Image: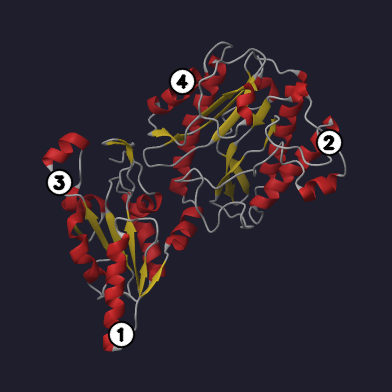
Amino acid sequence: MNSHPNHAAHAQRRQRLLASLEDAAVVLPAAHLVTHHADVHHRFRQDSDFFYLCGLDEANAVAVLRGHGAGGPRDPRFVLFVEPRDATAEVWNGHRWGAEGAMEHFGAEAAHPIGELAERLDGYLHGARRIGFRVGRHPHVEPLVLRVWAQQLERGQRHGGPSASLFDASAAIHAMRLRKEPGELERMREAARISCAAHEQARQAVRAGMGEYQIEALVEGHFRKAGARQPAYPSIVAGGDNACILHYTNNQDPLRDGDLLLIDAGCSLMDYYNADITRTFPINGQFSGEQRALYELVLSAQRQAIAAVQPGSSSAKAHNAAVEVLVDGLLDLGLLQGDREAILTGHDYRHIYPHRTGHWLGLDVHDMGASRLGDHHTALEPGMVLTVEPGLYLSNRLPVPEGQPPIPENWQGIGIRIEDDVAVTAGGHEVLTAAALKEVGDMEG
């Protein structure tokens, strides 16, 4: 059960969506349990769109949302189909709210056992000129929706009336999710607070000879002790050359004296709001010359990128600001060579910096919005939250572009990323994760 319910916020979101639907109805399924092995399931994780609008943290449910032009004026606008109360099932797998609980606690105007979805769906979609459903994502529910839609098309053809169309409502939902409400920002500050404290504890605890897994356990143990649900994503605890593997999650190697340690870890709260932080620091408390030069370069690039996070700016401007600083620094260090503009235009730095500088953040770690961050130049607005995470990864894994120098051996095996969560505000930005230190002096000692 959700330990931080905010049913008023869920109701307000449904009202905003319903107002935009007019004569449409939306069928929104919850997540299903996913098999881990044999008859054992992964820990349940609710579908983010479903949770955003309904607040119900149970598997196998389906919500039907009806715009005010769909059906009669007294027809229910929010209907939930849920697993029924069952004492035996609940002994094995925990509490269920059932149909009565769905109405009493989650604001459903009507609720039914999920087994009645097939027989009742046609009635609840009757009168809708458009049916919102995301095809290809919900194989348990899709055949029922398509069957009802086909029946309505047939009725329209027989009686000469308008036929319902099928559309994807996720764009409207994601546009809402992109701009965080004040209450959502408070939850993300809490996720950031817990995650920052975990990073600070980890940095103070690290010693050469420890295992990456020990730091992973420390970080994730703090998440749980502080009240978080779980890690927001598989934690990356990467010593030395492992940090040059962007999504390294084995976390099994010993930490070596003289190497850097990259920790990319954030928590997910009980209501699924996330933090996403990366810090990199010397295991023995002292940067080498090469490590310090690259660290200062990444930190400078991050400062410039964060400064570009302003209303009316874009993620592309933040990314470009970081890339320009990185390329200039790599040219000065001799790790790139040639014409600066040609390198920027040709992306001839991608063997050292192969990813973009950030992504949306919210109920999903790579959160949804009007567009994926980086695919389009979405103008930044107050309430949007994104990560800012430049990095440098010096290894021989990627081919060196023609005309660029090979990476000298004394630079290889250094991977550095610095990542913060940044909210766009009316006056600029707020770094939600500022409590996780990152200045050079703080990383040493």
Kind of element beneath mark 3: loop
- Which sits earlier in the primary sequence, circle 2 or circle 4? 4
The amino acid type, in three-letter code, at marker 4 is Leu
CA–CA distance between discs 3 and 4? 38 Å
Q: Left or right: where does residue 379 sit relative to residue 91? A: right
Q: Residue furthest bottom?
A: 160
Q: Quadrant of residue 295?
A: top right
Q: Residues within 10 Å of mark 4 (few under 14, many from 20)?
A: some
| Residue wearing tag 1 | 157
Which disc, if any, is residue 331? Answer: 2
Residue 270 in sight in this render = yes
Kind of element beneath mark 4: helix
| Residue wearing tag 3 | 85
| Residue 138 percent location from the top left of the image | 35, 55
The reply to whether callout 2 and callout 3 are in contact (CB within 8 Å) is no
The amino acid type, in three-letter code, at marker 1 is Gln
| Residue wearing tag 4 | 218
Image position of 50 with respect to 291: above or below: below
The amino acid type, in three-letter code, at marker 2 is Leu
Q: Residues within 10 Å of mark 2 (few under 14, many from 20)?
A: some
Q: Nearer the viewer, mark 1 or mark 2?
A: 1
